[in-house]
Amino acid sequence: MSETTAAPPPGADLCPLAVDLDGTLIASDTLVESVVALLRARPWLLLLLPLWLLQGRAGFKARVAAAGRLPVQHLPWRREFIDWLRAERARGRPVWLATAAHRQIAEDVAAALPLFDGVLASEGAQNLKGRHKLEALRARLGARFSYAGDSRADLPIWAAAESAVFVGVPPRLAAEARAAGARPEREFPAPAPSLHLWLRAMRVHQWVKNLLIFVPLLTAFAFLEPRALGLASLAFLAFSLTASGTYLLNDLWDLDNDRQHARKRQRPLASGRLPLLQGVLGAGLLLGAGLLIAALSSWALLLLLIGYVVLTTVYSGVLKTYVLMDVLALALLYTYRVVTGGVVTGIELSPWLLAFSVFLFLSLALVKRCAELVALGEEGRPSTTGRDYRVTDLAVLWPLGVGAGLCAVLVFGLFIGSPDAQRSYGQTSVLWLVGVGLIYWLARVWVKTSRGEMHDDPVVFALTDRGSRVAVACMVAVPVLAHLFLWGGE
């Protein structure tokens, strides 16, 4: 958000400045934040929300505020705007918080951000918005005041104010406010949600995980069969859309923890750049689209996808808070994709493939946790937030992760000497090149983790690290070429 300065109307700098909260002081809405926090703590209250809404907006806010306290210290503050407010107050200008949020939330914000000379907020049956807020401002501050806001409901207040401060106001609304008589004093533009922002929130780069659905086609050398390829492609699309929906729900669930994380605080929902209501709507649309594609493809895929949603929900809501249970769940979710590929294409999965997958994905899940703990250690923080891990756990997690990776290599080595490998390749000695590549790649991943150079998601690392891309490409190419050109059964 960059500041635009305009010449203030004469005498405006002497007026008390009233500041809105939702969308202005913070890049979010405290009512939606409160509902999300409430449902995260007590999901069963979802059944009561429609009944509370029947009591009107003010009554609904009072019910939500009474049911739980919002941790306002983690809200996505508009820092540049707050710095300007501090400068204004330092030169003697009175600053008031004037918000339609419930009084309890407003007072908590005022306590967390000691900037304000007073607070005006909704309480009782009064929703302090639009004309009601204007009347309250005139009653408390008199006829001459300035106002900082962000929404269409602020138009009558801007028109009546001595000067207006636009915070995150779209150009069209700013022009409408000027036409209605607003006299801008300052503007703090904020970027509108864009396609790039949505793609980040959907974590489209994570769709690469769903390529595991094609693994059974690769191992059975059925990737040129149109029907199997089509079924796997539909499963890939359904899983990808559904996974994006679960990522959005997970980000809503993890708002507080993400906002305390060095990197995750920049996520679209945690940072407030993507409104929470849009996140809820987007999650619903993505989940619906994924399940619809699955239903149109086959009942088996639909049931598998529902099972995936249940597993990810259990992981996000329960398992991720327990040490080691979370990495085991992640390893099983990776393997679940491989199983899905086998079921939808009708390809029987080898026990070798399943054992190899579990050990490999357990190693990568532990990479994810170790990378996070290494970063915490560098920051001087002793433990994670929202997860039961401590930096000292690296002494156990490190050998466990490396050992799991080596177990995957061992399973692959045993497979090379098995009758199954002989039937598929004939000349199996060439497969040792894959084993060597696997050792190199896993060692590279763990060395990068120890140096603090690992992205906390190994999938992102594999996509961006040149050595990883080359190693994985070679490991895929060798067995395919061996089957096509060196098969002893020709």
Image (tube, helix red, strand yellow):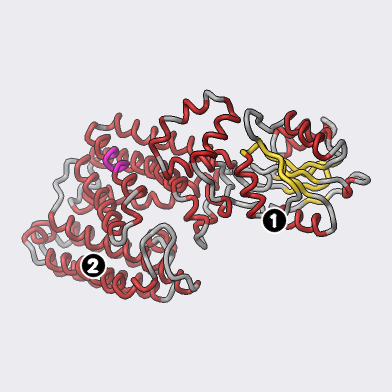
**Neighbours of disc 1 within 10 Å: few (<14), some (14-19), many (20+):** few
Q: Circle 1 is placed at which residue position? A: 114
Return the mark for residue 481.
none
Name the element at disc 1.
loop
Name the element at disc 2.
helix
Residue span colored magenta: 305-310
Q: Which residue is rendered at x = 44% and y = 34% of the image?
A: 285
**Neighbours of disc 2 within 10 Å: few (<14), some (14-19), many (20+):** many
Q: Which residue is rendered at x = 19% and y = 70% of the image?
A: 432
State whether residue 75 is above or below residue 487.
above
Q: Counting residues from the N terminus, which is met first, the one under dot 1 or under dot 2?
A: 1
Q: Circle 2 is placed at which residue position? A: 404
Q: Residue 282, how many percent across, how many down?
A: 48, 37
Q: Which residue is rendered at x = 54% and y = 43% of the image?
A: 33
343 relative to 180 in the view: left or right = left
Q: Nearer the viewer's eye, disc 1 or disc 2?
A: 1
- The type of residue carrying mark 1 is Pro
- The type of residue carrying mark 2 is Ala
Quadrant in which the C terminus appears: bottom left
Q: Which residue is rendered at x = 77% and y = 43% of the image?
A: 18
- Residue 456 in magenta? no
Q: Determine if residue 465 is in view.
A: no
Q: Residue 217, how many percent across, how many down?
A: 22, 48
Q: CA distance from mark 1 to mark 2?
A: 51 Å
